[in-house]
Image (cartoon, rainbow, N blue to C red):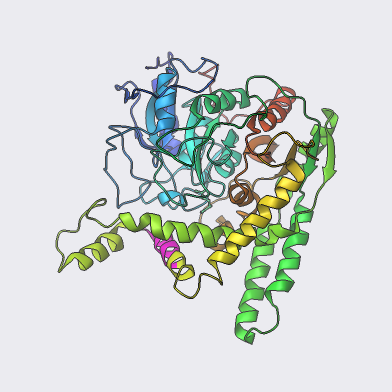
Amino acid sequence: MSYTLPEGYLPYAQAWEEKIGAFIEFTPGAAPSGMVEAGVSPGSGPADLEGLPFAVKDNIAVRGFSISCGSKLLEGLRSPYTATAVQKLEAAGAAVIGKTNMDEFGMGSSTDASALKQTNTPWDQSRVAGGSSGGSAAAVAAGLVPFALGSDTGGSIRQPAAFCGVAGLKPTYGAVSRYGLVAYASSLEGIGVLAGTVARCRSVFSVIRGKDPRDQTSRDAPAGAPPLEERVPSRTIGVLSAEAVARAIAAAGSAGTGEGRPAAEAASAAEAARIAAGAAELEPEVRRGFETARERFIALGYKLEDVELPILKYGVPAYYTIATAEASANLARFDGIRYGRRPGWAENPDDLIDKAREAGFGAEVKLRILLGTFVLRSGFQDRYYLRAQRIRAGIRRSFEALLGSSGYGGAPPRFDAILMPVFPTRAFGRGDTALSPFAQKAADLYTCCANLAGLPALSFPALVEGGLPVGVQLLGRAFAEGVILDIAETYEAAHPFPHPRGYRAFWS
Ligand code: GLN
């Protein structure tokens, strides 16, 4: 496994990287990791990745490379081993060219929560690349790599893909091994692909997927699942519009102020519901992009039908309850002893851990550990965590009623895919034009449901509005990545994906 850098690539890449800051470590021309263990072989994919470089989010292990997770606590740490997904790509002849920036431990929607550097969308340097896989998305969008690996816990591949104008695939839960992915919320997340074209997304996914003895949650696609290698005829798409989502949230607002609560608590719940409803509202350009995509799919011969999913109103609260609970457990390993920078002096072991975490974790990470510890507090599990798990099961059942379950063989489902927005805004700015941390969380509504339900989802650029790309999202049945990739590829063939000014196509 190695790559050949095309003529003119190095100055091009350096100039872009100065503007976008996609990489935490960028090593074009250096020896690749070269670690493919016995027994690891690429999935069934076409052999078209030979000789290509790729970038890897800095929470996925590549031997000899940085594994900082965008955190001060792990800054400078080098991985002693390589994630299975990366090994499979190396076995297919591709090679790692660098590690990309991200929100600290994957917690965020802008990459501005990285403790190490700032990443900008290649479309406008004053705006964020999205997150948490912002570095991977920006590197692909600027043409620095033909594809990159990211991770998606609640939208971290699809949202930056939308902000940067590339394709982003979050596979079915368990379709790709998580071995070598630093855990944030293990039951929600997975490794996925960001690429310049849907076809590239497909070939990378076909190489990295499959059961891995090192990850007991990983699975092969079940018998009867649509094949990845051939196009599958699909015609019916359910549309989850912003209006349907607004109706669901409005219902949540009235339920949130329910009786039996102290007045102050009810008032603050009502205020939170109001901000959440506002944050989920699509900005006019995104609305226009979504409507255009809907019309284009009709023109391409698809049958579109509106759907309602009232349970969506509980998506974000359930997601943040489960994600923070799991994060508080997963991040307990970062204690300055086993991992993390050790403070120069400490009174005793507890003081050492306190000092390491105080200096090493950023504000967002601390907030989430506290929230997770709170929802898991003894006597509180029923009220928060178990309730969130019941909502999660309800969300999965609601999607299965539309798309079918992972048990193939029964009656054909109502829809081949669900079309929905990715995020309410295009790439946002900083300072006055930034989205508040609360609004960013509320806006995860459109992406976090696929993670709660464990379903595959693909974000791709529908068009450019006001100089920035607008993404839309297709959500599919478990292990039906082939179907959503096909639908997106049909769209892309009629409406090729846009590129930022200054983009050069090095990787045909
Ligand atoms: N924005 C979401 C969060 O902050 C999703 C992040 C992710 O998918 N890693 O948790």
Q: In front: 347, or 281? A: 347
Q: Residue at x 70, y 51 (%)?
A: 397
Residue 495 percent across, percent down from the top left: 72, 27
In which image quadrant can residue 389 be found? bottom right
Quadrant for residue 157, please give it. top right
Residue at 40% across / 24% down in the picture? 40
In the depicted structure, whether residue 69 falls above or below residue 328: above
Residue 424 in sight in this render: no
Which contiguous range is marked in magenta?
Answer: 362-370
Residue 125 in picture, x, y percent from top left: 51, 41
Look at the image and say whether residue 184 sits in the magenta stretch: no
**Quadrant where the N terminus lies?**
top left
The C terminus, quarter of image: top right
Quarter location, residue 465: top right
Seen in the picture, residue 284 relative to 314 is either above or below; the reply is above
Q: Is residue 207 left or right of residue 91?
A: right
Relative to residue 379, is residue 120 depicted above or below?
above
x then y, percent, for residue 368: 45, 62
Magenta highlight: main SS:
helix
Residue 187 at x, y percent in the picture:
51, 50
* In this view, 16 is above or below 48: below
Residue 369 is inside the magenta segment:
yes
Q: Is residue 278 visible in the rendered structure shown here?
A: yes
